[in-house]
Image: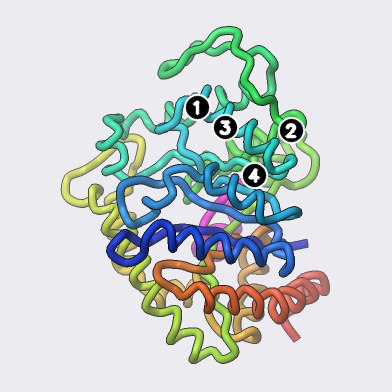
Amino acid sequence: MIQFGIQFFPNVGPETKSARQYFDECLRLVDLVDELGYANVRIVEHYFHPYGGYSPSPLLFLAAASQRTRTARLIAGAVLPVFNHPLKLAGEIGMLDALSEGRLEVGFARAFLPHEFESFGIDLDSSRRRFDEGIEQVRLLLEQPQASSQGEFHAFENVTSLPRPTQRSRPPFWVAAYATPESFANAGTKGHGIMAIPMAGSRIRELSALYRGAWRDAGHAGEGKVMLAFHMYCAPSRREAIATAKGPIDRYLRSLVDASSGWRGDRASSAYPGYPELIERLSKESFESQLEKGAAWVGDPDSIAEQVVRLWHETGGFDIASLQVNFNTLDADLAAASMRLFSQEVVPRVRRAIADGRGVA
């Protein structure tokens, strides 16, 4: 059964909203999650810029969220091994898994913003090696009561990470990926969930099939898990929804491009082939293009339900939709009303249509 969760991607700075106000609004939305049947809460890790910079520690926010929910899973989406020591990260994961009574799931990502690497003094070209080493070292620390690793960047000998995870053998792992086939295949082989963003339906369908095939070939039970991220704003009328969401989504996109501006010019990295061209394509994105390609679910319940079911079939099916509900400066009360309307009017229709193998009636 398809699940729906909410995600927070702060896209504000002190000139538009204080951190105190932003997180108060987020936690008030978290208060609705169990009541409305949302399956999980997710938040990112970024630094130094209005694009994500209010969340340098996703685990810290999820610790607060764990005390406002009782059933929702808590997903770090995602932590960045390149900027975190594995010993500290593993200990914090074990601590939050205990505080949440075993509801934590941990996503890992490589990071991609040049200004973050520059501020931390880390070479962009090392990011893939740091990611691979970091996720493996965290896995060892969580799974083994005494762990040793001699890595290129971090090394430890006979370390017992405390607290030990509440879930056995550890919280589930996810890997964030964009469009590299190897990333999807590797996640499936290693038994991790995949976090992605919606692209053209045929492309994500191909990548998801590659992931699920690698999952089965590695002998893991089930079919793996695919999570896609969307902006979502649901209102009684489509016109009202578009009028409300257009400005915040356009500002979000501009902020993303601004945060990624380090890729423009002659910047290049062997670890990120094609990224200057990718950012150039992103600079041409708009609310309208996001809506057209299905990356933004904005409208009334009827139009959103039709869009979700159509995209689910086009992509070959996904397991979780992670919904940005208070993007940019969208009013928190409007976000709460949108969450409620989506849960009550869209979710039941989508699940019935998918179960019946048809479109929305």
Q: Position of residue 332 (x, y in %)?
A: 50, 72
Residue lying at the far top of the rendered structure:
157
Q: Quadrant of the N terminus?
A: bottom right
N-terminal of the pair, mark 3 or mark 2, is 3
Q: Which residue is mark 3?
A: 92
Q: Of the numbered discs in the image, which one, if any, rests on residue 193?
A: 4
Q: Which residue is mark 1?
A: 134
Please tell me whether residue 202 belongs to the stretch shown in magenta: yes
Q: Which residues are magenta?
A: 194-209
Q: Position of residue 209 (x, y in %)?
A: 65, 51
N-terminal of the pair, mark 1 or mark 4, is 1
271 to the left or right of 188: left
69 to the left or right of 325: right
Q: Of the numbered discs in the image, which one, if any, rests on residue 227?
A: none
Neighbours of disc 2 within 10 Å: few (<14), some (14-19), many (20+): many
Please tell me whether residue 163 belongs to the stretch shown in magenta: no
Neighbours of disc 1 within 10 Å: few (<14), some (14-19), many (20+): many
N-terminal of the pair, mark 4 or mark 2, is 2
N-terminal of the pair, mark 1 or mark 2, is 1
Instruction: Identify which residue is drawn at 66% across, 42% down.
Output: 104
296 to the left or right of 351: left
Helix, strand or loop status at disc 4? strand
Instruction: Identify which residue is drawn at 49% across, 90% down.
Output: 240
* Label 1 with label 2: CB-CB less than 8 Å: no
**CA–CA distance in space, label 1 to label 2:** 21 Å
**CA–CA distance in space, label 1 to label 4:** 17 Å
Q: Position of residue 300 (x, y in %)?
A: 59, 86
**CA–CA distance in space, label 1 to label 3:** 14 Å
Question: Which is more foreground, mark 4 or mark 2?
Answer: 2
N-terminal of the pair, mark 1 or mark 3, is 3
Neighbours of disc 4 within 10 Å: few (<14), some (14-19), many (20+): many
